[in-house]
Image (cartoon, rainbow, N blue to C red):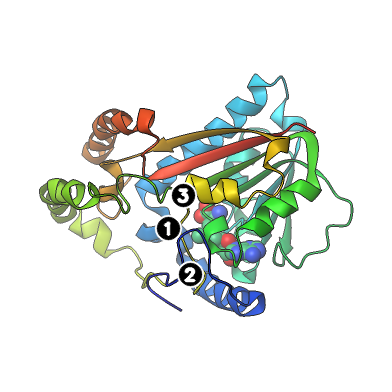
Amino acid sequence: MTERSETQPGGGAHHDLDAVLAEERELMNFYAPNYRALQFFNSYYYQQERRCFVDWILKTVRAAGRDPAGLAFLDVGSGTGEILEPLAAAGCANLTGIDIAEKMITESKRHVPGARLVHDSLERHDWGEERFDVITACLTVHHMCEPAAFFRFADRHLSPGGWFFLMEYNRGGWGHESPLAKPIGWLMTPLRKAIKIKNRGPISRLPSAPPLFNHAHDILRFRDILDAMPERENYEIKRYTRGIFVPTLTNALVPDSRADRAVYRVLSVVDRIAEPFQAGYMQGVGARRLR
Ligand SMILES: C[S@@+](CC[C@H](N)C(=O)[O-])C[C@H]1O[C@@H](n2cnc3c(N)ncnc32)[C@H](O)[C@@H]1O
């Protein structure tokens, strides 16, 4: 396990699949019981990003004249049901999730009782001829041994006219490895410190755990995602990116504070300056299978 990935950008290194899956399973079983309360997986910032992602999925599907309620969804790396739960709340009834960590599956059964939940890896599970209309993966592909495995799976198991949607960190964003990353961090330090001091009570009551990742964990550029798609020409691809200043407050904001929600709303408007440059911290990638 590593605190920082040591691979090449975009998952260029070769890893042993069984070793990566075993490590991921162990780590995610460790996090599962407190997953929803951990700031580095589920802070107010992440909750808002997931909400935006699910809204985008539903909007995209409806704009194409399809009713999400009647579609077969698969969420890869379904965790405790972070994506399946809002899909169920939106009326989607045909929901499947797969996760390598059995304790994540146990948690998700409580949150999404109507979903079919598979304990296995995406790479090893035998799906037979099964097809899905929508395949989602939220913060999962960069945990995989080889991101291309996700796209090969989509090529085989996505219905024609169906979509896959990813939410992933954007390695090409200004907040990651660009020369702007440090100045953005410095600029935000006083506000982050002030909010953390204000929220020290609620934050101190949250469970904490060290941020540990499997040794193949590696965040992706949009280009890495495109390069990992073997049949890219068969898809119509859309993308958004979000966040410059807001992500620096990830571990500081708490959802129960009106002041924090106001800070979030104001900074989210400022953060839109990154959108025309596709330079936001987080990216959503949606691809519709044309044939
Ligand atoms: C960072 S968590 C994201 C969970 C959830 N999607 C969310 O939005 O919070 C990554 C999840 O993917 C699962 N996972 C990672 N690699 C996997 C694989 N190859 N097959 C199935 N699940 C996998 C992990 O067990 C973990 O639950």
Q: Is residue 162 above or below residue 102?
A: above
Marks 1 and 2: in contact by CB < 8 Å? yes
Instruction: Write down the residue under mark 1.
Output: 41
Per the image, label 1 sits on a secondary structure element best described as: helix
Inspect the image, locate mark 3, and give the three-letter code of the amino acid beneath it: Arg
Compared across the picture, whether 236 is left or right of 265 comes to right
Whether 286 is drawn above or below 81: the answer is above
Q: Would residue 27 be seen by someone viewing this image from the given angle?
A: yes
Q: Nearer the viewer, residue 132 or 67?
A: 132
Q: CA distance from mark 1 to mark 3?
A: 20 Å
In the drawing, does residue 183 fall left or right of residue 143? left
Specify whether tag 1 is near ligand 1 (CB below 8 Å): yes
Q: Which mark is residue 221?
A: 3
Identify the residue shown where x is 24% and y is 41%. 260
Give the farthest residue toward the right.
129
Residue 53 place in picture, x, y as percent: 51, 38
Q: Kindly indicate the quadrant of the structure image that contains residue 95.
A: top right
In the displayed structure image, the side of residue 250 where residue 15 appears, left or right? right
Ligand 1 within 8 angstroms of badge 2 C-beta: yes
Q: Which residue is mark 2?
A: 31
Name the quarter showing ligand 1.
Answer: bottom right
Q: Earlier in the sequence, mark 3 or mark 2?
A: 2
